[in-house]
Amino acid sequence: MSASAAVPELGAPPAAPAARRLTLSPAAISALLVVGLGAALTLVAFQGDGGLQLSRTVPLSIGILIVSGLLCALALLGGRPARRPWGLLPLVLFGAWTALTGASVIWAVDSSTAWVEANRTLMHLGVFAAGVALVRLAPGRWRELLSGVLLAAAAVSFYALLTKVFPGSLAADETYGRLREPFQYWNAVGLMAALGLPPALWLGARREGHAAVTALAYPAVGVLTLTILMAYSRGSLLAAALGLAVWFAVVPLRLRSAMVLLPGLILGLLAGVWTFGQSGLSDDRVGLPLRSNAGTELGILLGALILVLLVTGILATWQRERTPRPERVRRAWGIALLTALALIPVLALGALSTSDRGLSGSVSKGWRDLTDPNAPSPANDPSRLTAVGSVRSRYWRDAFVIASHDKALGVGAGGYATARVRVRKDDLDVLHAHGFAVQTVADLGYIGLALALALLAAWLAAAYVTTGPWRGRGARPEHDERFGMVALGCVVIVFGVHSFIDWTWFIPGTVVPALLCAGWLAGRGPTLETFPADGGLRARLRTFGRQPVRVAAAAAVLIIAIAGAWSTAQPLRSTNQVDDALSALAAGRIAQARTLALKAGDTDPLSVEPLFVLATVEGAAGDTAAQRRALVNATEVQPESATAWRQLAEFDLSAGRTAAALREISAALYLDPRSPQARAIFLAAYRAARARR
């Protein structure tokens, strides 16, 4: 080409500038992933609430199922190959557990609740499977997972504290002193904070990462500790202690971890003790002006706590990196820390020995308070943190009594609440047995418990493959990912311990991060195994057409996710149709109300609520025969529902059919002997029958 050919033609438009491609640094991508995951988990916590409102949990569950299905399908089509299908056995057993829960609809005492629980369990399976899938899609992003869990735990905990700082804006109608937002349940708030402690120790003790980011672990520990204390959650304290004990026992970063834990623990404890003495922060039924004044003081204290711990973290991290300690010194401090941990129970026993009751008397009283179903419940104030007594023994006793009626398969998923009214010795209406194992025995029998234990054993084996062994023959070298996997395991341990003594596995905000960590840990495999870098996800997806088995599996996963989303939506659709029917009835549109009630029954044929509404509509229309037919159908749909039999008996009594009413109310009293409404109807029916003689 000549030189003149390179000169642009006179009057020609200027050449378009070369397109610049926006590229982000690895650190920026990592930060975006952490913020995105943390925001998603925080959204789950706020949207899921206490896990009991279908209007909040159903849209969330549908979204989780769809996202989980897409992730699993992507992992099947373009996931990185591994030497073995790590995590497959726990995944299969989780699927079997879900299938058993769904099958229990057949024999459940409350089939509509069993359907809801089957949908909930399917969502749990989806989260666990998503954790396994993410390992195949992005095996190097375990740091982002841990950081996202920590961010969500800190955000929820900070919000819970802000409800005390700004009660007029965030909790004007609050009547309790304990923290319970955003879950409406204090123990869930405490558990959410406890879930953040293992990731916080990992963040502060790790040997990699920017020092400024590492320093954030210090104020995080303080905020999480204060949240647990202000929730008065004994179960969260126990779960956090056991999870951190595993961390200190297994991970050799003991001195680093102690440097992160102790400042936040001490200052958080001091701040918590101060709040216990403030009536506006710790007492129930306190007026808003007093709560606002105390909240201002708490806000100042909280700001000072965060600032002091942040400065402490920066200085400690800088000092640690500037003057690294010799191996001999680190080992000596590690041994000293383990010794101190081992001495804690010894000191506790010594303190009990010097008490008025002595060691044996104190242990006997504690055991009696813990296991006696008739023991009084501890006060709903800070003193409960040192109390042993609980009403759980009452709920657990009832669970085993329920299981004794059908030891093999139980009363069906979610059937504990319905079955308990027949065996209870109090007037409390309790939805859960406050313990995963005992609720499983009651709901799914010993077959369900055996399957749950098999799932636990499979997960523990998979976790050991990923993280161990640490000592002896076959011990693997220490490295950062291995420490991260232990932190994931400690998150799961905290959740598992708490779920053993409470019902927090029903709450999306606490169960989703734990199952995500559990799935990742099970699916990772040995940390020394690396996944081949073969061109990225797009390149792997281009070859999926050559693997028909994977394509079929991915299609099956998507079908299951879509079917599960549809199934999850039906109970809420039925509830909305019932509400619309009642609104139409209140407006005098009887024909429309009847149509909506019938649609609600078709949408959820396992529920008796549409039949109750239909009976009300037919009564308003003056068709007593159709009204009674709807009530009879309710007793056939759920023959072990005391409410169904009671409503039918009440109708027959008002219609003058006293003999039928006596039979029906007798069934209601058999199912719920302590019901005051059923007793009143029985007495009225008995008197009417005697008057006719």
Image (cartoon, grey):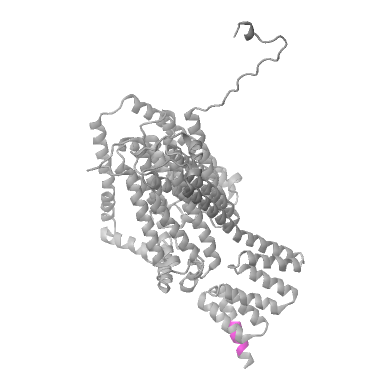
Looking at the image, which residue sits at the far front? 1
Residue at 36%, 58% in the rendered image: 454
Residue at 45%, 46% in the rendered image: 131
Looking at the image, which residue sits at the far right? 588
Where 209 falls versus 669 (above or below)?
above
List x then y, in percent, for residue 419.
Answer: 48, 70
Q: Which residues are magenta?
A: 682-689
Image quadrant in which you'd find residue 379: bottom left
Where 95 falls versus 419 (above or below)?
above
List x then y, in percent, for residue 182.
Answer: 54, 49
Looking at the image, which residue sits at the far bottom? 693
List x then y, in percent, for residue 114.
Answer: 52, 64
User: Looking at this view, is 653 or 524 the one in front?
Assistant: 524
User: Looking at this view, is 454 or 429 the one in front?
Assistant: 454
User: Would you say residue 546 is visible in this rendering?
Assistant: yes
Image quadrant in which you'd find residue 375: bottom left
Main SS class of the magenta portion in the image: helix
User: Would you say residue 234 is visible in this rendering?
Assistant: no
Where 77 falls versus 3 (above or below)?
below
Q: Magenta segment: does it hold 548?
A: no
Count of marks placed on residues: 0
Please give left or right for residue 626 compared with residue 416 in the image. right
List x then y, in percent, for residue 28.
Answer: 50, 30
